[in-house]
Amino acid sequence: MHQEQLQFRTPGRGTLDITAAIQEQVAAMQVQGGVATLFVHHTSASLIVCENADPQVRRDLEAWLQRAVPDGDPLFGHVDEGPDDMPAHVRSTLTATSLTIPIRAGRLDLGTWQGIYLYEHRTAPHRRRVSVTIVV
């Protein structure tokens, strides 16, 4: 088993491709098979596997989430950190805080058009922590 904590700086709301950083951890272990489990340590960010070829897919996902969970919705009473605070919490529960990706032939066994993304749900930049656990 190998465990590492990675830090990522997000530019604000949107997706950040972290596939290469996770693959580096797999390569460092020099394993041929197993699983990589990822966990984000925040309640207003998440992890997704999404298409990596056309960025419009991620923009469309963001547009849908904007419509489904708008900032400043009067429905929400939890606004301690601003109008995007509670919507960010809802977004993270609708997506995922952890992912498990198979490892095959020394690489993440992702599909041709798949990438791993840290999804920042707050509008301001943040530093986010992601734990990577590799089990053989």
Image (spheres, rainbow, N blue to C red):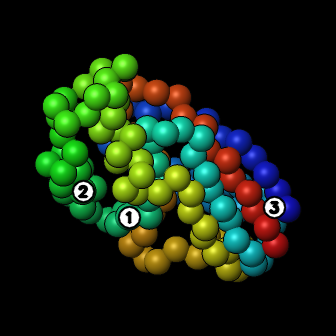
Task: For marks 3 and 1, give the CA distance.
Answer: 25 Å
Residue at screen point 70% across, 80% down: 105
Closest to the observer, 5 or 89: 89
Left or right of 74, for residue 113: right
* Residue 59 in view: no
Q: In this view, does 16 lie above or below 2?
A: above
Query: Which of label 3 and label 2 is nearer to you?
Result: 2
Q: Where's residue 81, x and y in %?
A: 37, 20
* Residue 42's disc number: none
Left or right of 96, for residue 57: left
* Residue 50's disc number: 1
Left or right of 105, for residue 123: left
Q: Mark 3 points at which residue?
A: 29
Q: In this view, does 95 lie above or below 120?
A: below
Q: Where's residue 110, x and y in %?
A: 52, 74
Q: Mark 2 points at which residue?
A: 61
Q: Where's residue 101, x and y in %?
A: 60, 70
The quarter holding residue 53 reads bottom left
| Mark 3: few/some/many CA within 10 Å (<14, 14-19, 20+) | some
- Residue type (three-letter) at the residue carrying disc 3: Met
In the picture, the quarter occupied by the C terminus is: bottom right
| Mark 1: few/some/many CA within 10 Å (<14, 14-19, 20+) | some
Q: In this view, does 2 lie above or below 35?
A: above
Q: How many labels does the image show?
A: 3
The answer to whether the residue labelled 2 contacts the one labelled 1, judged by CB atoms less than 8 Å apart, is yes
Task: For marks 3 and 2, give the CA distance.
Answer: 33 Å
Q: Where's residue 32, x and y in %?
A: 77, 77
- Residue type (three-letter) at the residue carrying disc 1: Cys
